[in-house]
Amino acid sequence: MVEHRFKIGKEEKQSIRISHSATTGKSEIIVNGKSIVIFNGRALRPTSRVVDSITVAFTIGENEKHKVNIRIRGAFWNHFEAYSDGEVVYRS
């Protein structure tokens, strides 16, 4: 199991954790200790040299709101990109 952690926000910090299992393909996105999505990444496989991906979009924050997009590529690859308000905040 591999975990990626990063924070978003200046005044109101939001903690985001992505856990990913390379053996099962299961991924989970956790925001401030609460799981918001769990999915089986086995469907995210390269087909004919084309990499499939999924993007999870959500808004976080009470006073300081941020639109977050997390892009996950490949079932057995450990590649994540996180965008906050259109800017890259994390890439693995």
Image (tube, helix red, strand yellow):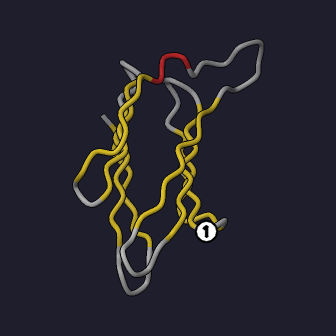
Tell me which residue sits at (53%, 43%) in the image.
Answer: 56
The quarter of the displayed image where residue 40 is located: top left
Percent position of residue 16, x then y? 36, 58
- Count up the numbered dots: 1
Residue 31 left/right relative to 66: left
Whether 91 is drawn above or below 86: the answer is above
Tell me which residue sits at (57%, 51%) in the image.
Answer: 81
The quarter of the displayed image where residue 11 is located: bottom left
Residue 39 left/right relative to 33: right
- Considering every residue shown, the one lying at the far left of the view is 33
Residue picked out by circle 1 = 85
- Considering every residue shown, the one lying at the far top of the view is 48
- Residue nearest the viewer, comparing 10 with 22: 10
Q: Amino acid at mark 1?
A: Asp
Percent position of residue 68, x then y? 53, 59
- Residue nearest the viewer, comparing 91 with 64: 64
Whether 85 is drawn above or below 26: the answer is below
Tell me which residue sits at (47%, 24%) in the image.
Answer: 41
- Residue nearest the viewer, comparing 64 with 15: 64
Image quadrant where one finds the N terminus: top left
Tell me which residue sits at (37%, 26%) in the image.
Answer: 26
Whether 48 is drawn above or below 18: the answer is above
- Considering every residue shown, the one lying at the far bottom of the view is 11
Percent position of residue 51, x then y? 70, 26
